[in-house]
Image: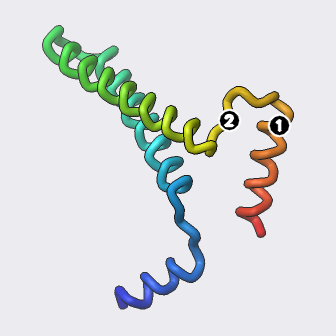
Amino acid sequence: MRNMIENLIKNNTYIDDKVIMLSMLSSAKASANMYLNSALTSSTPELRAIYSASLTQMVEGHTALTELSINKGWFKPYDKPIQQLTCSYKESQNVID
């Protein structure tokens, strides 16, 4: 059963470094949001300090991932907005096809 599922995934899904990076960035964003909400709603200063420290680590990690993505050319934040929209549209068409 396991081999069958692995074969289905390998045959139907193309996973490269960019896809993994997007997944990591999405997870980091969700985690940072969780730590921010926890820090804002914590009942004691000690908990607030713990959550704030964790939030700082999450932001630093997200920054490192974003810089890596820019250096690899996967993200182009300095392109004109119309170029960014065109690129996003083409990528969405590739997903659909």
Q: Label for residue 31? A: none
- Report how far apart the C-alphas of labels 2 and 1 lie in the structure: 9 Å
Residue found at x 25% / y 17%: 42
Q: Determine the image quadrant of residue 6.
A: bottom left
Q: Amino acid at mark 1?
A: Gln
Residue found at x 20% / y 14%: 49
Side of 73 where 34 appears, left or right: left
Location of residue 78 in the rendering, given as x and y in whole percent from the top left corner: 71, 26
In the foreground, 76 or 31: 76
Q: Are marks 2 and 1 in contact (CB under 8 Å)?
A: yes
Q: Is residue 46 above or below residue 87?
A: above
Location of residue 62 in the rendering, given as x and y in whole percent from the top left corner: 43, 32
Residue found at x 80% / y 53%: 90
Mark sitting earlier along the chain (2/1): 2
Q: Amino acid at mark 2?
A: Lys
Task: List the residue tagged with mark 2.
Answer: 76
Query: Which of the colour schemes (rainbow, by chain, secondary structure, one colour) is used?
Result: rainbow
- Secondary structure beneath label 1: helix
Q: Label for residue 83? A: 1
Location of residue 54 in the rendering, given as x and y in whole percent from the top left corner: 26, 25
Side of 1 where 15 appears, left or right: right
Location of residue 96 in the rendering, given as x and y in whole percent from the top left corner: 75, 65
Residue found at x 44% / y 84%: 5
